[in-house]
Amino acid sequence: MEPPRILVIGGGFAGVECVRLLERLLAPDEASITVVAPRNYQLYLPLLPQVASGMLTPQSVAVSLRRVFRRTRIAPGLALGVDLDAKVCVVRGISGRMRVEPYDYLVLAPGSVTRTFDIPGLTEHARGMKTLAEAAYLRDHVIGQLDIAAAAPKDKKKEARLRFVVVGGGYSGTETAAALHRLTAAAVDRYPGLDSRAINWHLVDIAPRLMPELGEDLGRAATEMLRQRGIDVSLGVSVAEVDSDTVTLTDGRVLPCHTLVWTAGVQPSPLIGTLDVDTVRGRVKVNETMDVPGRPGVFAIGDAAAVPDVTKGDDAVCPPTAQHAQRQGKAVARNLVAALRGHPMQPYRHRDMGLVVDLGGADAVANPLGVPLKGWPAQAVTRGYHMLALHTGVARARVMTNWLLNATAGDDYVRTGFLADQPPMLRDLEELDAYLSVEDMRRYVETAEVSG
């Protein structure tokens, strides 16, 4: 008999941690493991703002799955639907060819996509910060605005080019605004036609304070660091409308602007909508052991799963953070092995290890194990955490080398232009219309090619 087939959908934090532990816990003849992922690397999202700012190269935060995994089969492609009755996943390969991947045990870890709202012009004119392509686009775009403004003959034409708006006061938005502000501030020395006082950065969030998970004191400290550097932090405010050269805020301000970066949260992958399962705010409802009720052998973790937080009770679920995703990945691997061997599964319990926020240079805040830190001590903890979280020595070496080179030699402010002819906006980069309906998926499965 062939060994059971384990299929893991997703190559992010949750999926990678799950597979790494499965490889260690299972003998090669005990089960086969397949990962379906659109890319052959794990994107280390916490450092993506540093890619946009040029501190790190894109390859530095793309951790090769083929270095991380030893014997897992990597099936490149986008999972478009899952038929839980037939136990197959419908996949569109990178060549565009459709196929199905069969399984005996399934781990759903497809992650999330950028959350948007019904704001006029948002998807047509905003830029995201969730993929390598978006970070590369954003860097080229920001440097392009400096190039255009430096060559513009009139100050009025410069204003919109030199105003940048970031929406979202969470970790991604705050670090993106901080990193790109440092880029433009440092670039002024290379642009004789620009005045640093003409460059305006705005960080906007509807919440009353930045990064509330840090606590009031550290959140306030981060806000003050940004404001002291000249970033306009507007809280209790959001975007009302966007067009090609203005951003209108809900407080009535109309800002001449060609750059709106949208980082206002995430929502579960559209793959979840193809499943015949109960959901909680779009996330798969699972038990404390992360298995899907009524679906033996099916587990869900990470941003796309509503995993109960047993440490809080009262129907609380774990937030969609990298820290939870990593630990859920390890815990579900143990539970999957227990299910395979007929042993009892254990509930997921999370112990918060603290949070780290890199604002560039000596500016950082962190609360490792609940200890509040600011400045250089926080920066040391932050970068040490990233070094530990990167899975390969090659990735660590690339990041450390990039940090050292940027600190000593600075940036050349070069636009690569590799993606200049591709559409860079929110509506273009996340293939939200590609996913199958339940009916279309089942019709397809009846005649589909099955992967061997």
Image (cartoon, helix red, strand yellow):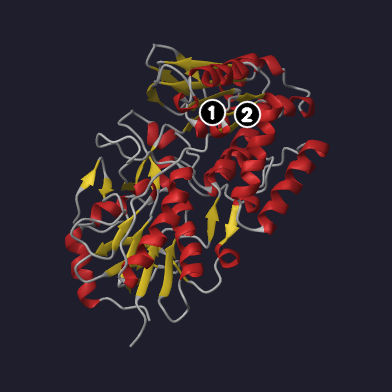
Are the residues at dot 2 and dot 1 in contact (C-beta closer than 8 Å)? yes
Which mark, by number, is residue 290? Answer: none
Reading the image, the residue beneath label 1 is: 174
Nearest the camera: 79 or 13?
A: 13
Which quadrant is the C terminus positioned in? bottom left
Q: Nearer the viewer, residue 329 or 149?
A: 329
Give, as a three-letter code, the residue at label 1: Thr
**Residue 150 seen anywhere in this rendered image of the structure:** no
- Quadrant in the rendering for residue 164: top right
* In the image, farthest residue toward the front: 344
Q: Residue at x 49, y 69 (%)?
A: 23
User: Residue 288, position in %: x, y?
Assistant: 29, 49
Q: Residue at x 71, y 27 (%)?
A: 376
- In the image: residue 294, left or right of residue 403: left
Q: Secondary structure at mark 1?
A: helix
Question: Where in the figure is residue 3, as x and y percent of width and height?
Answer: 37, 81
| Residue 322: percent from left, percent from top | 48, 44
Residue occupying image coordinates x 54% and y 48%: 133
Residue bearing the label numbered 2: 359
Q: The disc labelled 2 sits on which kind of residue?
A: Leu
Give the vertical position of 14 relative to 235 (above or below): below
Taking the spot 57% from the left edge, 38% from the top edge, the residue there is 138
* Mark with earlier residue (2, 1): 1
